[in-house]
Image: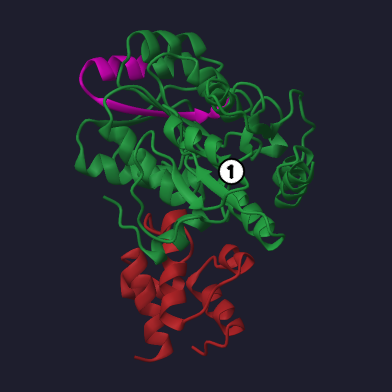
Amino acid sequence: MMEITARNIRQWNRLGPRAVYGLALYELIGRDERVYALSADLGTSSGLGRLMADAPERYLNVGIAEQDLIGVSAGLAKEGLIPFASSFAPFITMRCADQVRMNMGYMHLNIKAVGLSSGVSVGGLGNSHFGADDVALMRAIPGMVVLSPADCVEVVKAVEAAAAYEGPVYIRLTGEAGFPNIHNGDIDLKIGKAISLREGEDVTIIAAGSMAHMAAEVSDRLRERGAGCAVLDMHTIKPLDTEAVRRAAKRSGLIVTMEEHSVIGGLGSAVAQVIAGEGVRPRAISLGMPDAYLKNGSYSYLLEQCGLTVDAATERIWDALQE
Amino acid sequence: MTNLEKYRQAFITALNADENILDDLNYQDIKEWDSVGHMSLVAELEDAFDIEMETDDIIDFSSYKKGMEILRKYHVEL
């Protein structure tokens, strides 16, 4: 197990989620001979440089061929191995959707797909590389677990949890190097169990991935204005922690979801689906990427265009509370 | 331990580097000084000298000698 210390967290935070994924996998292959790393010509971008150098026999590069990436992973999984296959989020979900659907879904093989830099963190590369719809696609596949770690500690924990879980898992990486951490020590990350980051009565923000730390900051700002704001870190988007959502719906008159994903089909849709089945009817607001193609730009510029900033989210929620 | 000894020890601990090659060591000269090793080295130095390095300095830290120059900015005399 990787040691969760203040120093390691500081180091991981500087390296960013992709490098930390590579480190976690490097550690994992050292203690589990079934684990293999695969990529579609993105080994270095997956943080696998050290693993590729020190354990080349445990790394497979299939070339720029994501359908093959899933197909080869399926073969390994059929032999009892645990393949971790990584590529940029849209390439390992949408581009090879049929292979994912048949091998990870229908055959329920023990494949771990890792979507790098989902959302808009690779801003300069444009819409071809943005992860706007990966959650929508992956959560629609029966039996798929969808994890969205909120910081580098959760990336480590998500990799460990995925390896221990028997079945298909999609790990969605968001954020970038230097992104704020939300955990300063070890955590108990259980698949399907949300983590409470803040308590409050008036509103509950349910956030995933890169948005969790922002949600916590929004909560602090709202508290300064006299509004109680709970925050749930929904690191598992599927299976969703429906009990936590139901409790929030009964407690708060306003439920807000925050995600670096399209407002269609992601965490907001999953939460709305749960709330719709409840007897109580809190107002629900979904903050995420618009149903549109974005212009290229820096990560911070794109988050601003999507209204996914602490300032914008605070004002939006504050206004809703005043209505 | 003098500051110079602490500085050298950080390379030995973080990068498992041979003390005899330190003076001319550059980033990526040895496989341990990759991006991950680099952050380990920075963490080691920060703990040794009780400092917090800025991102630009972490990026500029391209060799043993350059690192000595950078640490002077943090009032670490070597």
Q: Quadrant of residue A206?
A: top right
Which residue is at 65% across, 59% downward? A223
Tell me the residue that label 1 is attached to.
A204
Residue B36 vertical position relative to residue A268 in the rendered view, above or below: below
Q: Position of residue A118 (x, y in %)?
A: 58, 34
User: How busy is the neighbourhood of tag 1: few (under 14 within 10 Å), some, or many (20 plus)?
Assistant: many
| Image colouring | by chain
Which chain hosts label 1? A
| A261 sits to left or right of A238 | right
Residue A13 image position (x, y, % from top left): 50, 56
Residue drawn at x 59%, y 43% as measured from the top left: A205
- Viewer can see residue A50: no
Q: Residue at x 37, y 85 (%)?
A: B5
Q: Which chain is green?
A: A
Q: Which chain is red?
A: B
> What range of the chain is rendered magenta?
A71-90
